[in-house]
Amino acid sequence: MTTATGRLTFDSLDPATGAVVGTHPVQDAAAVRAAVAEAGTAAVWWAGLGWAERRRRLLDYKAVITRNLAGIAAAVHDETGKPEADATLEIVLAITHLDWAARNAHRVLGPRRVSPGMMGVNIAATLEYRPLGVVGVIGPWNYPVFTPMGSIAYALAAGNAVVFKPSELTPGVGVLLAELFAEAVPEHGVFRTVTGLGETGAALAGDPGVGKIAFTGSTATAKRVMAACAANLTPLVAECGGKDALIVDEGADLPAAADAALWGALSNAGQTCVGVERVYVVDAVYDDFMGELTRRARKVRAGEDYGPITMPAQLDVIRRHIRDAVAGGRAVLGGPESVRAPFVDPVIVEDVPEESASVREETFGPTLTVKRVADVEEALEKANASAYGLAGTVFSGNARRAVELARRMRGGMTAINSIISFAAVPSLPFGGVGDSGFGRIHGADGLREFSRPKAVSRQRFALPGMNLTSFTRGQKELDRLVRLVTFLHGRQKR
Ligand code: NDP
């Protein structure tokens, strides 16, 4: 049996050394179909367990992950090249989300009575959120635990089974996550992983047995996934990266802002969907900020403080953006020579024209463009002038102005005087607008994303003389209705 690519297996590599760290099957459309069908059976069992038992099992899974933290971090390090300390951090965040989803699913999604309103005094109205069945999760390689778990944990807590297709760069981590789940839930394959290349993901997106796809990756691939979903009207939540900006306002704590900008830009070698790629600094503090930034940046080393570029093809994008940036702006630190594959040293370029590819397109590398602006209004205008709209950061000494800026910043999340702090708050939804995608993972919105609302209206008693949905209805009943609606809604409110 061969797949369309003619390959039966593929290797996952250590991006720092090129060593093979695992070999996995390329699962074809038939294998994906079988996995989805089996997950469908498991989904019925899982949904039937009820809120309390699912919560217990998910908390067990959380404990299994926590006990295996070191082993998972090693697997993440092997396949992404990131330092184990950073891998540990992303796993801890995933644990926090799993815990929140498990503990809050019943409260957010469980049946509740809602007010029927004056027109429905004889109706008992209830609302609940039912699972979708099988959720297909197509994951990225940059945070192979934290990012997919943002969908997997919430989908499971909502009562769905999950079929997970990890990136071909991090299949071992994906397999491990499902294996560990089976320790907490051995009875049925409620969470299973399928491995393969892009076509395995395409098969999952196009499978009619899938109730929803949660995709994280590039905007271009999201469009292909959406087209595959269209065949079955399968809904999609898409998280597609960004070109996030950090704004430095007057009165900001400049050492903290510089520290945050650097972490946001360089950690994980810049391969972070909510990483900082652009900085806008108001004129009054520009020189001091740049002093802080460059002094700190000189001490950061690729290969020590952060790992290699995980996806080899990304090096071409990074190289192109660096060349583009230094051609139009002034290199403050590094330049084209900073790319020494598979590592890229920090690159900071100032005054790059806003229409440059390095300012407009996602770089996904350890680079930063910095721009001097007259005031925060100009900073906001430039920050928002992007096809992307995922997240952003504001550093300011004025809390009120910072909150106002954050609210007006295009994108789903903004951190103030901190970096990416929203990702660590499980009750906050996560997702973008525009080319950054749509839909939300995390929080109550993330739980609802993986369920469908079910509305039930039960008539408790018949309203005498008010049977309006009957062919026996007379003019008197209609007159009564008009009098009532005029009383309720006909007066002008001040
Ligand atoms: P892709 O968008 O190509 O891949 C993301 C996931 O989709 C992977 O699991 C991939 O599988 C899968 N996939 C690929 N083709 C299809 C398809 N036709 N149907 C269904 N699933 C598919 O991202 P890349 O990994 O190639 O990275 C490219 C760029 O995407 C990066 O340079 C970066 O800019 C952006 N990106 C953004 C991320 C984010 O966090 N938002 C994460 C990762 C990348 P496979 O790996 O097997 O091809």
Image (cartoon, grey):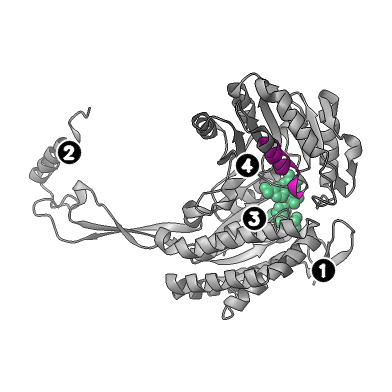
* Residue 22 % position (x, y): 82, 68
Q: Earlier in the sequence, mark 2 or mark 1?
A: 1
Query: SS at mark 2?
Result: helix
Q: The residue under label 4 is which amino acid type?
A: Ser
Residue marked by disc 4? 436
Residue 289 is left or right of residue 159, and the answer is right
Q: In the image, which disc is placed on residue 488?
A: 2
* Viewer-closest of 380 and 433: 380
Whether residue 140 sits left or right of residue 49 in the image: it is right
Identify the residue under disc 3: 147
Of residues 114 and 53, the one drawn nearer to the viewer in this rendering: 53
Task: Name the quarter where the N terminus is drawn.
Answer: bottom right
Q: Categorize mark 3 by other alpha carbons within 10 Å: few (<14), some (14-19), many (20+).
A: many
Which residue is pictured at 51% across the width and 61% down the height?
101
Q: Which label was assigned to residue 22?
A: 1
Label 1 amino acid? Gly
Q: Is ligand 1 less than 8 Å from the beta carbon at label 4?
A: yes
Structural distance between the alpha carbons of marks 3 and 4: 15 Å
SS at badge 3: helix
Q: Amino acid at mark 3?
A: Thr
In the rendered structure, which disc, 2 or 4, sits on the residue that comes first in sequence?
Answer: 4
Task: Tell me the kind of residue under disc 2.
Answer: Leu
CA gap, disc 1 and disc 3: 21 Å
The picture quadrant where one finds residue 71 is: bottom right
Q: Classify residue 2 by image quadrant.
A: bottom right
